[in-house]
Amino acid sequence: MPFVAVGFAAQLVDGALGMAFGVISTTLLLSLGLPPAAASAGVHTVETFTTGVSAISHSFHRNVDWRLFLRIAIPGTVGGVMGAYVLTKVDAAAARPFVLAYLAAIGLFLVWRGLARPVEPKPAKVVEPLGLVGGFLDAAGGGGWGPVVTGNLLVQGLDPRRTIGTVNTAEFFVTAAVSATFIASMGLAAFTVATVGLLIGGVIAAPVGAFIARTAKPRLLLALVGTVLSTTSLFGIYRFMAT
C-alpha cells in the first residue's frame, strides 16, 4: 500500500504538471538500496503503463499538440535508448548535480513568470535537441524527461496545458523504448516488487492528472511546474552532496 500511495501521488503530479513521477519513484527505490540501473529500469517499466493511460487521458481532453509531439517523441526515443545503454555500462552520476542546478534555475524562472507576468504563448525555437537530451537524461538518471522537456518548452513560451499534455503523451514512447532496452540488457533484474504498487497507484492517478492539466489556469500551472521543478532539483542536489 505505501508503494500504491507513492505511485498515485507521483503520477498525479506528473499528469498535471508534466514531471516528477520518475524523480519521486526513483528516489524511493534508491532509498531502499536498489542499484541505480535496477531502480531506473523498474520505474520505466511502471511508466510504460502509467504514461499510456496518461496519453489516452490527455488526448481525450485535447491537451496534445500532435506536431510538437512528433518533434519531441522521435529524438526522445533515440536519446532514451542511448541513456539506458550507458547506465547499464557506466556510472553517469557525475554530471547529475550540474543538470539539477540548471533545472532548479529554470524552475525559479517559471515561478517568477507564472506569478509576475501574463502568459503569452509563442512558438518554440529549440525542440528536437530537448527531446534527445531529455530522453537520455531520463534513462541515465532515472528521471528527467518532464523537467528537461516541459521546463524548457515552457521557458520558450509555449502554452502550459498543451505542453504538459504533449510531453506526457510523448513520454509513453520514450519509456517503452527505455524499458525494452533495460529488459534486453538486464533481463528479470529490471523488475522489483515495488513496481507493482507504483503501477497500481500510477494508473489510477493518470486520468485525474490529465483533467487537472485541462482545467487549471495557465499562470497557476507555470507557477506549480516551477515549484515542483525547483524543489525536486534542489533535493536531488542535497542528496548528491550528502552521499
Image: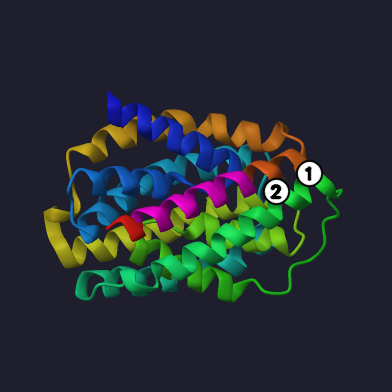
Q: Residues in magenta?
A: 226-239
Read off the residue under disc 1.
Answer: 115
**Residue count near mark 1 (Cα–Cα under 10 Å), binned few <14, some 14–19, many ≥20:** few
Quarter holding the N terminus is top left
Q: Give the numbered dot on residue 206.
A: none
The percent coordinates of residue 194 (x first, y second) are 22, 38
Which element type, helix, strand or loop, lies under badge 1?
helix
Does the magenta portion include 84? Answer: no
Decide: is 51 above or below 95: above
Q: Is residue 38 above or below residue 194?
A: below
What residue do we see at 37% from left, 49% from top? 48
Number of disc labels: 2
Q: Is residue 231 magenta?
A: yes
* Residue 102 in the image, given as x and y percentages of width and height: 55, 66
SS category of the residue bearing label 2: helix
Residue at 24% from the left image edge and 59% from the top image edge: 36
Return the mark for residue 111: 2
Q: CA separation, marks 1 and 2?
A: 6 Å
Query: Given contact means CB atoms under 8 Å apart, are the residues at marks 1 and 2 in contact?
Result: yes
How has the structure been colored for display? rainbow
**Foreground residue among 139 and 155:** 155
Across and down, in percent, residue 225 comes to 62, 46
